[in-house]
Image (cartoon, rainbow, N blue to C red):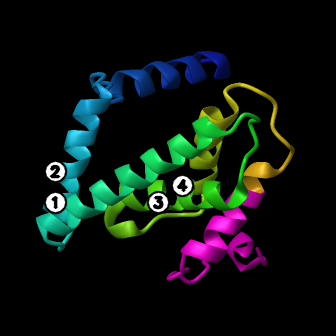
Amino acid sequence: MVSERARAKLNQIAAKMTRPPKQKARSLAQLRKEWKESAIRTSKVAVDVINSLLEYARAAAAAAAAAIRVRAVAVVDVALAAVDVAATVFVMNDGGRFHRRHLPAEARGHFALVLRGRRREPDLDDRIVAAALSMYCLDISEPKTVRGLESG
């Protein structure tokens, strides 16, 4: 007779043994190159359109970064953050399709650049996500869960 504890440990060992190996770490430059190649390969959009989108996104990011550096006080502009978050998520996902859950992570990344480790206001990321969704995103899916049916 095998104890429940031993059975759980054996299950844990089996799960680790059957798990696929981890991917090798890659540099950001390599990841960007692979993302661009993947976008060209998988989207049904011309290569020059993808290149122009990347140039546009880089120019917008550079302009946003310059505007942020100019400010003496670290203040998060919700409208600027919404543009940055929406543009970043759009460029990084297949054909501009993404889920709402992708936006908060990018909003927090925006805080890291703007606030440089300083405290932020509570619920600021929710306001940025709401602004990005209302101004720059179009919901094309039907809600499949109870949470999806909730307003906001």
Say which residue appears at 28% left-offset and 25% top-offset: 26
- Residue matched to label 4: 84
Residue type marked 2: Glu
Q: Which residue is mark 2?
A: 37
Along the horizontal axis of the image, is 51 left or right of 22? left
Q: Residues within 10 Å of mark 4 (few under 14, many from 20)?
A: many
Decide which of tag 2 and tag 4 comes sooner along the chain. Answer: 2
Q: Based on the displayed image, in which of its 4 quarters is residue 28 positioned?
A: top left
Badge 1 is on which residue?
Answer: 40
Residue range in magenta is 127-152
Mark 1–mark 2 Cα distance, whole angstroms, equals 5 Å
Q: Are marks 1 and 2 in contact (CB under 8 Å)?
A: yes
- The answer to whether the residue labelled 1 contacts the one labelled 4, judged by CB atoms less than 8 Å apart, is no
Quarter in which the C terminus is drawn: bottom right
Crowd tier of the residue under label 1, counting other residues whose Cα lies within 10 Å: few below 14, some 14–19, many 20 or above? some
Along the line of sight, which residue is nearer the eye, 149 or 34?
34
Q: Please tell me which of labels 1 and 4 falls first in the chain.
A: 1
**CA separation in Å, label 2 and label 3:** 19 Å
Secondary structure beneath disc 4?
Answer: helix
Residue at mark 3 to residue at mark 4: CA–CA distance? 5 Å
Nearer mark to the viewer, of 1 and 4: 4
Q: CA distance from mark 2 to mark 4?
A: 23 Å
Work out whether residue 126 or residue 49 is closer to the camera in this orientation and state it. 49
Residue under circle 3?
87
| N-term-proximal mark, 3 vs 1 | 1
